[in-house]
Image (tube, grey):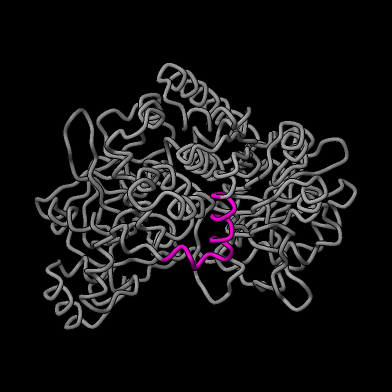
Amino acid sequence: MASNWYVRRTNPEFVRYLAGASSISTTTAQVLINRGFKTPEEISDFFDAAANKLSDPSLLPDVHKAAERIKEAAINGEKVLVHGDYDADGVTATAILLITLRSLDIKCDYFIPNRFRHGYGFNTEAIRVAKEKGFGLIITVDCGITSFNEAEEARSAGVDLIITDHHEPQRDIDGMPKRPVALAVVNPKLRPDVELPLCGAGIALKLAYLLLGSDMSSALFDLAAIGTVADMVPLHGDNRIIARLGLELINNDSRFAIEALKDVSSLEGRKISAGLLGYSLIPRINATGRISDASEAVEMLVSDNMDRVQTIASELNSNNYKRQKIEEGVLREALSMLKGRPVESCIVLHNDDWHEGVIGIVASRLTDMFKRPSFVLSVKDGVATGSARSVSSLDICECLSGTEDILIRYGGHKQAAGLSLSTDMISDFRERMISIVRERLGDEEPSDDLYIDAEVSLKDITFPLMKELSKLEPFGTGNEEPVLAARDLEVVSPRVVRKNHLKMKLRFDSYTLDAIWFNKGDVLQRLIEPGKFDAAFIPSINEWGGGKSLQLTVKDIRPSVVKEENL
């Protein structure tokens, strides 16, 4: 249970004004105010997530240089190799660029590094393939910004290089971003004057727009939406538009691959939201890069052969099941290693037997559980390859830069990164990282606070309210689902279902709604005690067996406080 609840409050008169001026409920108005919208015009613009409101691709550095070089390749009949990455963002970005190049009648192929054979990032194997097979141009997607040696090797081999990436660049002693040697380096993080937090697929979509125009490139929004949701970039601005329009395509079965993935995910007839996308299609795309070879996922996304697409989708589904089992085992071992250990500022764990394909997920799980940055390393042949996940207030890449002298390589985002180092440096790395994190975060214990968008009556949770809140979708990073709270509720028929989830009904007077509290079976006895409760929850519409019903996903429940108290 959360230690503190904080209800975000605004002057009631202003809430009523904004609600009336925007023709929305006061609940929705309060939620929008919490997200920074203060005028009816801002709210109207937010609701109208249209393609013509996307930012100008020219904001991306070198994007016109990249487009002109690709057009030159089309005119000269050159072959182009697209170098992608093995996660869902890299796979969808690769597919976007392949479809774009083929639309321009450019002979092209793709190279996806194998996680276990090549590792992360722009790989020299792709340069060798390009040279041997006569590719005059390599275009990276979702990687390359820190590949200085590889870029030099491409130049020495006489292969032109365009880098498109969105990861954090390395910086010089003055804090200026360093650029690999290439014809064009398209990365929004090279422009400090512009905030454009696109993922790799989003950048590929911008390049496609310049090459194909708005009409043809609009058919690629579904792929860009998958990459956008998968990489957990903030869902506002361009990312919100891409995700929203892409989800519309996904829900209209616009592509063989997406239809096949929905089939193996048992999603027939269900509306796909960003959240459901993140729990269904995306893990299956990611799984093939974690367990096998992500090249198959690219083939599936660009293929028009339905039989082949269905075969690959089934393989991805099988790989996802294997990934889940492996992940459970690694997490169990990691938690066992942490038992009895003193709690440090961050978690650093390593093991010779851990599967490299799941350590990123395990690091994320540990960070969620312990509210601390986590580094999980898999050791092989004297090298520890790892994934890092951070808390919201800490830039993990900046922390890693403080240990750069003992790392073989590193790179990523503020919240997630990859790294490798010699095994004899692990102990030194742990000590230094604990010190670095403590210096930045202090010794204060991480809080488990719950922030609530609005206090409501349970009777306010209706289908009309849900329709109104759906205008805020897609929900995700930077635009989280609204958390509401209600007082003086009865908990009716609580019971543990499946593994450890609590199923119950919440009642106010005669109004009752179904509720579920995930992974909280251990608090059942507290809810059986007599008395009223306050509940914080995310309201939703549950679709099952062709019907729809209102359901609450509980975030926390506690005994009711008196009305005068703040929740």
Of the 4 image quadrants, the one containing the N terminus is: bottom left
In the image, is residue 559 above or below residue 292?
Answer: below
Q: Residue at x 15, y 55 (%)?
A: 508
Find residue 159 and report its horizontal and vertical position in percent.
73, 46
Find residue 550 and report its horizontal and vertical position in percent.
19, 45
In the image, is residue 124 above or below residue 66?
Answer: above
- 115 within the magenta span: no
Is residue 354 in view from this perspective? no
Of the 4 image quadrants, the one containing the C terminus is: bottom left
Magenta residues span 56-71
Of residue 59 and residue 327, the one placed in the foreground of this image is 59
Of residue 136 and residue 505, the one placed in the foreground of this image is 136
Of residue 119 and residue 547, the one placed in the foreground of this image is 119
In the image, is residue 101 above or below residue 426?
Answer: above
Find residue 291 and report its horizontal and vertical position in percent.
62, 29
Q: Quadrant of residue 468?
A: bottom left
- 70 within the magenta span: yes
* Magenta span dominant secondary structure: helix
Q: Residue at x 32, y 52 (%)?
A: 244
**Residue at the far right in the pictured view:** 424
